[in-house]
Image: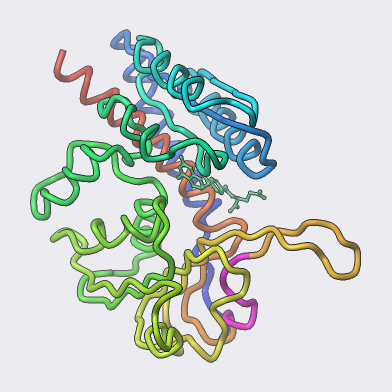
Amino acid sequence: MTAQVLDGKATAAAIKAELTTRVAALRARGVVPGLGTVLVGDDPGSRSYVAGKHRDCAQVGIASLREDLPATATQAEVEAAVARLNADPACTGYIVQLPLPAGVDTNRVLELIDPDKDADGLHPTNLGRLVLRVKEPVTSPLPCTPRAVIELVERHGIDLAGAHVVVVGRGTTVGRTIGLLLTRKDVNATVTLTHTGTRDLAAHVRAGDVVVAAAGQAGIITADMVRPGAVVLDVGVSRVSDPETGEARLRGDVAPEVADVAGWLSPNPGGVGPMTRAMLLANVVESAERAADAS
Ligand SMILES: Nc1nc2c(c(=O)[nH]1)N[C@@H](CN(C=O)c1ccc(C(=O)N[C@@H](CCC(=O)O)C(=O)O)cc1)CN2
């Protein structure tokens, strides 16, 4: 079997085209959505993701604002950047790029974000809303990567209702939050959350109709662990050095041979990553629409 491709690049492009129309409609009402970013340090991955977010904003007509701080920034300096974006009326939503350098308390920073400007859906108030609203629509931003996974699968015509989804990894941006979305009534999947402490990971993964690999460990999901025909989403990214050239290369959590077994597979790059960026834009547009409708 050769897996069909869950094409994140093409799907994200279609979503961005839809959002461009919605942003134009907001601008016609005098509302200009503005995304802010807080980037601390010079991690090449984080720098490139933030640059991509600003490029996306320019493409769809969202204004963008940057708070770039050095790796030596103190907790107080990071908190001051958050306070500036909270107070800036031109910023309708913003994100703090993760991970933050060691020495900065991530949870403390996330808690200081104005929940109404939380474009990542990672503020405790917004996560709490997601916990409480199982049946009714959620009218607050949703975590971008979990939303990206679900949107990518559904836009390829795959129904998640009743499916057994096995999630590998318990990080803040994906593993801990994706189950909250997948088990909502409108998605109706059943979720197993696995992590580094899980005994016999392979047996759990093999039981999945859908596998979400978000452990950040290159090639952890091998072909023998995947049920033939399963839907596999490769979310994790690791930078590994090429043994021959020594150059840094990006590798996903899913070994290439999984394509011979899976029914559907998201490429990495070109799968969940571009969709994560598209869902961030969707969060910003939806928040601006809600605010405009309320005023
Ligand atoms: N505040 C947040 N921090 C982080 C998040 C997040 O959702 N919010 N997720 C990840 C990083 N991330 C977004 O911030 C992200 C990762 C990857 C991509 C992407 O488009 N990747 C490309 C490949 C890019 C490359 O070649 O380097 C792809 O998959 O095709 C976008 C966003 C952690 N931090």
- Residue pictured at 36% horizontal, 30% vertical: 284
Q: Position of residue 186 (x, y in %)?
A: 16, 58
Place residue 115 in its image quadrant. top left
- Front in this rendered view, residue 197 or 208: 197
57 in magenta: no
Q: Position of residue 170 (x, y in %)?
A: 39, 62
Report the coloring of the rendering.
rainbow
Q: Position of residue 76 (x, y in %)?
A: 47, 21
Q: In the rendered view, would you say 111 is above or below 136?
A: above
Quarter of the figure with the N terminus? bottom right
Residue range (magenta): 252-259
- Residue pictured at 66% horizontal, 40% vertical: 43
Q: Position of residue 251 (x, y in %)?
A: 66, 64
- Front in this rendered view, residue 69 or 31: 69
Quarter of the figure with the C terminus? top left
Place residue 166 in its image quadrant. bottom left
Tally of marks: 0
Residue 49 is left or right of residue 156, and the answer is right
Q: In the rendered view, would you say 121 is above or below 159?
A: above
